[in-house]
Amino acid sequence: MSDQDFIILDEDEKKEDSSSAQETEKKETAEVSSSEQKKDDDGYEKICFICHRPESVTGKMIELPNNISVCPDCMQRSFDAMNNGSIDLNRLMNMPGVQFFNMSDLENMQPKQQKIKKKKEKPKEFHQLNIKDIPAPHKIKARLDEYVVGQEYAKKAMSVAVYNHYKRVATDTMDDIEIEKSNMLMIGPTGSGKTYLVKTLARLLDVPLAITDATSLTEAGYIGDDIESVVSKLLAAADNDVERAEQGIIFIDEIDKIAKKRNSNQRDVSGESVQQGMLKLLEGSEVEVPVGANSKNAMVPLTTVNTKNILFICGGAFPDLEEIIKERLQKKTSMGFNAELKDKYENDKELLSKVTVEDLRKFGMIPEFLGRLPIIFTLKGLDKDMLVKILKEPKNAILKQYQKLLALDEVKLDFDDGALEAIAEKAMEKDTGARALRAIIEEFMLDIMYEIPKDDSIGQVTITREYIEGTGGPIIQLRGQEVPRLG
C-alpha cells in the first residue's frame, strides 16, 4: 500500500467521526429543547402581566425575569411612552425619597391569577354528544317526575327543548341546515317549582349548567355585575374549559326584575338597559369574559366564549301580570245577549296560562328581548292536592327527610292523612307555594325533635290533624307497647 492510500483512509475516518459527532450534538440539542419545552408547556396559556390577555389572542409573549410575561403590544406601548418623553426616568431616579422599583416586587403585587387551558389545535370532536346516546324527551321527563310533582306541560316543554339543544350541538357541522336555538321563558307564581325544575335538570344532565339571577345585573359601567358575568359563571361551572362551556345551559332567574321601569325620569340602568345588553348573548355572539371573576376590572385574564350553542332558560314570577291579562280579557265585555260577566276572570286559576307576548310587553319586557325567547310556557299555582303530593311523593320529599332523621334515632315517624291536609291548608293561606310547607313543618316538628332524643323508650310518633291545628298532641308509642298514649 502507498502513502496516498493511508491519507485517504484517515480522511474517511475523520468524516465518520465528524458525522457521528454532529449526530450526537443534534440529539443532545433535541433532548435539551424537548426538556425545556416540557418544562415550559404545562398545558396552560401564558397571560400578559399588563393587559391580562392570553397568548392565543396576543401572540408570542416576551419573557421577563421572575416569570413575568408581557405581550408585544404592551411592550411596544411601553417603549413608545419612553421615547415620547412622557416618562422621564432620570427625574424619577433623582426624586428624593423615591427608589427604583424591584422586578421581584411585582410578583407579590399581582393577585393570584386563574389559568386558562390551551385550546386543542385538532378539530372539535363531539364524542360525548353522540346522537344515539342523547336521552329522549320522555326519559328526561320521567326523571323529572321523580322529583317534581305536577307541572306536566312545563316538564314536557323543558325536556323537548333540552333534547333539541343536545341534537343541535351534536349536528352543528354536519350539513348546511342550521338549527335555531330554542331559548325558553318560564312564567309561574312564587313557589311553583321554576328554580327546582332547573336544579333537578342540572343533576340529571352531563352538560355544565349555571344558575344565576338578574337582580344584580346592571348596565356596563355601573355598580353591580356586568351582563357577561352570567357567561363567566358558566365558564366556572365548566372548570374554565371554553369548549365545554360553549355547550352548556344558563338559567337566569328573577328575569321579571329587569322589566322596564314605569314613570321613571332617571336612567334605567337595571331594567331596559340590561335587556338590551342581553340581546347579543341570547342570539349568539363572541363575548370576552373574565376568568374567575364577575367583573372585567379585576386583574384576571379574559377569554372569548361563543354563546351560539348555549341554551338560555329565563324564569320569573311576574307579579301583577295576571292583572294585565285580566284587563285585556275584560275588554271583550259588552252589553247585550252575548256579553261576558265582568267577574268571570276574578277567581280563574288558569288565568296565567292565557298570557300573550303583548301582555309581557305591557309588563315591561322589550319586544326584541321576547323575540329571542321563542318558547314561552307557564307553571300552574299549587292547589291543596298538589301540596299534599309534594309533602310525600318526591324522592327527597320533606316528610321523607324527617323520617330519615328520626330513623337515625331508631324512632318511626308517621303522618296521618288529616295532618297532611291540615299542613296543606295552612300553606295555602301563606300563599308562597311549596316554600310554605317547610316553614310550617319546621314549626310543628321543633318540639318533637327536641323531646324525642331525651327518652330512649319512644319507638313511634304519629302526627295528627289535632296536633297541627293545636287542639291535641301527637300519638307517641313506647317500645314494646301496643297501647298508645297522648303526649
Image (cartoon, rainbow, N blue to C red):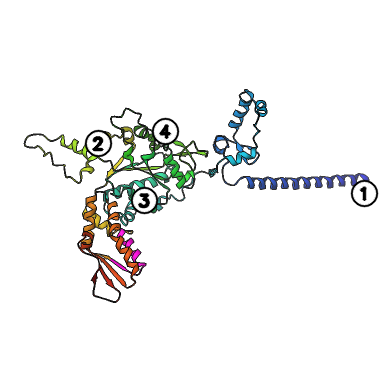
Place of residue 320 in the rendered image (x, y in percent of width and height, measured from the top left): 24, 39
Of the residues shown, which amino acid type is indicated by label 3? Lys
Q: CA distance from mark 3 to mark 1?
A: 94 Å
Q: Is residue 54 left or right of residue 448?
A: right
Callout 1 environment at 10 Å: few (<14), some (14 to 19), or many (20+)? Answer: few
Q: Amino acid at mark 1?
A: Met
Residue named by callout 1: 1
Badge 3 marks a residue whose secondary structure is helix
Does 227 sit left or right of 389 as displayed?
right
Q: Are marks 3 and 4 in contact (CB under 8 Å)?
A: no
Q: In this orientation, which residue lies closer to the viewer: 398 or 439?
A: 439
Disc 4/disc 2 C-alpha distance (Å):
30 Å
The label number, if any, that marks residue 222 in the structure image: 4
Helix, strand or loop for the magenta stretch, by majority: helix
Q: Residue furthest right?
A: 2
Q: Which mark is residue 359?
A: 2
Q: Nearer the viewer, mark 1 or mark 4?
A: 4
Q: Along the line of sight, which residue is nearer the eye, 184 or 68?
A: 68
Residue 326 or residue 422, whichever sits in front: 422
Question: Is 33 situated left or right of 346 in this image?
Answer: right
Dot 4: element: loop
Residue 132 is situated, as x and y percent measured from the top left of the image, at: 40, 52
Q: Residue at x 58, y 37 (%)?
A: 49
Q: Amino acid at mark 2?
A: Asp
Does 160 sit left or right of 347 as displayed? right
Front of the two marks 3 and 1: 3
User: Disc number at residue 199?
Assistant: 3
**Which residue reaches farthest bottom?**
480
Label 1 SS: loop
**Quarter that holds the C terminus:** bottom left
Density class for disc 2 (Cα within 10 Å; few <14, some 14-19, many ≥20) is some
